């Protein structure tokens, strides 16, 4: 048996913000874009109705992956998003996450490739058994195929590894599909982040805001273009905010340790 004293429960998004906040005092937003996606930010206490007091700020864990579950994203969802959602473990839930995170982008691409093949636009109109297999097109293949230094022969080699015999034209189309799906994900993620930082600015009654976003997640870090497109989108949609992005290393662990240290210090001060 263990004698454990639980003083804080922290998710990876808040941990990431705290880790980066230790390095940069302007860090007031946390973002995870990896297998899943989530965000958090520092809200003015006067706007937090569930807690008494109006002084200071409180971290709000947004769980933004669930944005769109009420249908507000329906105008942006395609038939491929709907197909991925319906066959997922939680249909109708986490719709925003299913459009932007690493767990689902490869599956969106696979559904598009099947549709194109049925139309005779790819693979000579022949759908292989491998292509019918859910999860076969992993999101890491998007990163590999979109790499600027990757020649079409190497793209064909990746497709061959997936059991897909392709021509050069097939490779060009597949690469374009991967580009469009990843770019849309980055732009949607950037749009969400622009809304968050602009809300912070408006809440504080500022004409301009300088803020840092602490970021972690394999999709953000490893995809060759995701971060750049997301940054551009934030700049375009939140022109009154000077937003910097700081990558976190082991944000979950370090952030939890920092929060635990602060919680213990506050508790000890209250016991004196």
Image (cartoon, rainbow, N blue to C red):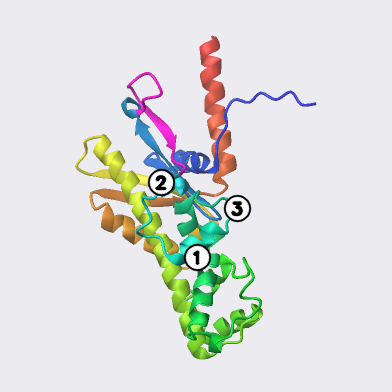
Give the numbered dot on residue 70.
2
Residue topped by disc 3: 89
Q: Is residue 171 left or right of residue 229?
A: right
Q: Earlier in the sequence, mark 2 or mark 1?
A: 2
Q: Is residue 142 left or right of residue 240?
A: right
- For label 2, the SS is loop
Structural distance between the alpha carbons of marks 2 and 1: 30 Å
Give the numbered dot on residue 223.
1
> Would you identify the image quadrant in which residue 234 lies?
bottom left
- For label 3, the SS is loop
Q: Earlier in the sequence, mark 2 or mark 3?
A: 2
Q: Is residue 39 visible?
A: yes
> Total marks drawn?
3
Q: Residues within 10 Å of mark 1 (few under 14, many from 20)?
A: many
Chain part drawn in magenta: 48-63
- For label 1, the SS is loop
Q: Earlier in the sequence, mark 3 or mark 1?
A: 3
Q: Position of residue 266 (x, y in %)?
A: 51, 20
User: Residue at image x 62%, y 67%?
Assistant: 134
Q: Position of residue 1 (x, y in %)?
A: 80, 26
């Amino acid at each position: 048996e263990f004698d454990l004293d639980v003083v804080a429960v922290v998710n990876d998004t808040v941990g990431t913000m705290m880790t980066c906040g230790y390095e940069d005092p302007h860090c007031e937003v946390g973002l995870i874009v990896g297998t899943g996606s989530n965000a958090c930010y520092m809200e003015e206490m006067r706007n937090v109705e569930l807690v008494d007091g109006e002084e200071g700020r409180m971290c709000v864990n947004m769980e933004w992956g669930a944005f769109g579950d009420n249908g507000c994203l329906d105008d942006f969802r395609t038939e491929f998003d709907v197909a991925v959602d319906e066959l997922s473990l939680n249909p109708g839930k986490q719709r925003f996450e299913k459009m932007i995170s690493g767990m689902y982008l490869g599956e969106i691409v696979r559904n598009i490739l099947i549709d194109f093949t049925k139309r005779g636009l790819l693979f000579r109109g022949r759908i292989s058994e491998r292509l019918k297999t859910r999860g076969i097109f992993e999101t890491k293949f998007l990163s590999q195929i979109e790499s600027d230094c990757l020649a079409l022969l190497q793209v064909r080699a990746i497709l061959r590894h997936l059991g897909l015999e392709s021509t050069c034209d097939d490779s060009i189309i597949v690469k374009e599909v991967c580009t469009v799906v990843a770019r849309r994900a980055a732009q949607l993620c950037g749009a969400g982040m622009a809304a968050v930082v602009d809300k912070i600015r408006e809440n504080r009654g500022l004409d301009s805001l300088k803020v840092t976003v602490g970021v972690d997640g394999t999709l953000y870090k490893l995809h060759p273009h995701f971060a750049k497109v997301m940054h551009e989108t934030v700049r375009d949609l939140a022109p009154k905010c000077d937003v910097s992005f700081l990558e976190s290393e082991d944000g979950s662990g370090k952030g939890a340790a920092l929060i635990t240290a602060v919680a213990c210090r506050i508790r000890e001060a209250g016991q004196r």
